[in-house]
């Protein structure tokens, strides 16, 4: 079984300083504040009705504005629909208290629950910027049709099935617009699902950063295997589906599942310069149906979504890969699938498995599967340490 790929393999052990994603100042004197219907900037939101009222009002505004909302610790907020921030917004959502009270409090984070049949919680498009801290995003099992939310400013790169990307969050932009940017600090994504990016899909022309986040039991669904037409490509990125620059630090991926590739994280580089860095993170007991139980770095020139994957790079260091499993057939990489340029250092890759459909014998690369220019390399047993 071979894919029609021209891929480049480079596997190095590095310990250099990590690539750092850019951050931005939310409050800028030259950007007006998003108005309330009515209220004050930075207000504490008391309940679901108020949150939905404010978000509905904000997403109908055109032009740049910045908004800050604080959600009460330990409270649950239900969204009535998906909210699309289309344009140069600067939005910050935080959970819990602030200042000395926050340091002294052990209260549970505010929880945002997707209560409607809309497949996502939020989309941030065409240069929108979002910062989220101390929140929990839970998926909804309510039945209903997936309703696509289109941008008025950027044609979506996901033209085949735009509603199928990102179980909780979708970010992307387009040429001629600023990058859409996301910073997520201390955020938990649990039980979210879609067909590409069970928790978050960070599309082309985006820049994202995840610090101290948890991804638990998110899933991408659909019947996926290699022998299919590419416009049916679904089931990649159980927690994260990444297509542009991303930095992941001190995060935990546990029990996520992908029908096709990347049980925890899937990366298809846009162009030839996209970079993903994973540092100090943990991948435990994620599962996949085809390649990359924990992480999959897609092969160059593979048609993923509606554009070919470019020649990007994935750096992983000081991380753990334990108990990740590939199941349901001829598996490529129970722990990590590397289709092109991977830098892996100072990481544990232990007890991962690539099992055939019977579950009785291994297939290709229990810990790491490497696809090279002149052939294929693999370890059927996890090397304990890189």
Image (tube, grey):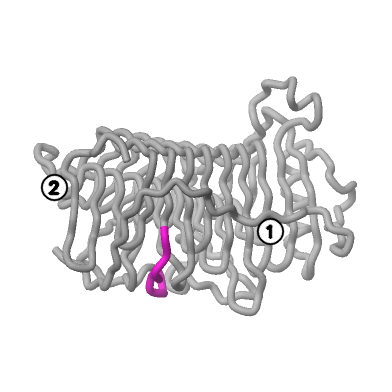
Who's the residue at 87% across and 64% down the image?
30
Q: In the rendered view, does 12 fall on the left or right side of 158?
A: left
Left or right of 305? Residue 100 is: right
The residue tagged 2 is 363
Label 1 neighbourhood size at 10 Å, few (<14), some (14-19), many (20+)?
Answer: many
Look at 18% across and 39% down and name the residue there.
381
Disc 1 versus disc 2: distance between alpha carbons?
Answer: 43 Å
Q: Position of residue 97 (x, y in %)?
A: 77, 30
Marked residue nearer the N-terminal end (1 or 2): 1
Q: Check disc 1 and report the residue beneath it.
A: 129
Q: Residue at x 33, y 65 (%)?
A: 233
Magenta stretch bounds: 305-313
Element carrying mark 2: loop
Query: Dividing the picture into quarters, in which one does residue 105 lie?
Result: top right
Counting from the top left corner in percent of width and height, residue 284 is at 37, 34
Q: Quadrant of residue 225?
A: bottom left
Asked where in the image residue 123 lies, by quadrant, the reply is bottom right
124 vs 262: above or below: below
Give the SS element for disc 1: strand
Res. 145 in view = no
Q: Is residue 51 magenta?
A: no
| 341 on left or right of 132 | left
Residue 333 location (% of width, % of height): 24, 49
- Which residue: 39% across, 39% down? 346
């Amino acid at each position: 079984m071979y894919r029609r790929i021209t891929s480049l393999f480079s596997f190095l052990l590095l310990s250099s300083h990590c690539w750092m994603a850019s951050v931005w100042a939310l409050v800028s004197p030259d950007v007006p504040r998003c108005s309330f219907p009515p209220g004050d900037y930075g207000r504490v939101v008391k309940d679901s009705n108020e949150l939905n009222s404010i978000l509905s009002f904000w997403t109908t505004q055109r032009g740049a504005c910045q908004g800050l909302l604080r959600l009460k610790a330990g409270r649950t907020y239900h969204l009535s629909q998906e909210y699309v921030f289309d344009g140069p917004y600067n939005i910050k959502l935080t959970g819990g208290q602030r200042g000395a009270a926050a340091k002294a409090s052990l209260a549970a984070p505010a929880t945002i629950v997707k209560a409607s049949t809309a497949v996502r919680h939020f989309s941030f498009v065409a240069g929108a910027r979002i910062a989220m801290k101390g929140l929990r995003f839970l998926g909804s099992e309510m039945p209903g049709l997936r309703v696509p939310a289109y941008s008025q400013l950027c044609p979506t790169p996901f033209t085949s099935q735009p509603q199928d990307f990102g179980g909780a969050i979708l970010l992307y932009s387009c040429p001629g617009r600023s990058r859409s940017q996301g910073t997520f600090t201390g955020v938990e994504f649990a039980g979210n699902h879609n067909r590409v990016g069970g928790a978050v899909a960070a599309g082309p022309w985006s820049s994202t950063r995840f610090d101290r986040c948890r991804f638990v039991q998110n899933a991408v669904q659909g019947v996926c295997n290699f022998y299919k037409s590419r416009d049916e490509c679904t089931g990649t990125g159980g927690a994260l589906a990444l297509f542009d620059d991303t930095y992941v630090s001190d995060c935990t991926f546990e029990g996520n599942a992908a029908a096709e590739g990347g049980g925890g994280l899937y990366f298809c580089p846009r162009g030839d310069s996209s970079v993903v860095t994973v540092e100090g993170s943990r991948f435990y007991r994620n599962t996949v149906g085809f390649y990359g139980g924990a992480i999959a770095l897609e092969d160059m020139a593979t048609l993923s979504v509606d554009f070919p994957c470019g020649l990007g790079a994935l750096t992983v260091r000081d991380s753990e890969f334990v108990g990740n499993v590939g199941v349901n057939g001829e598996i490529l990489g129970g722990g990590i699938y590397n289709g092109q340029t991977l830098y892996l250092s100072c990481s544990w890759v232990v007890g991962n498995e690539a099992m055939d459909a019977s579950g009785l014998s291994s297939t290709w690369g229990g810990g790491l599967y490497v696809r090279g220019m002149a052939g294929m390399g693999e370890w059927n047993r996890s090397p304990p340490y890189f």
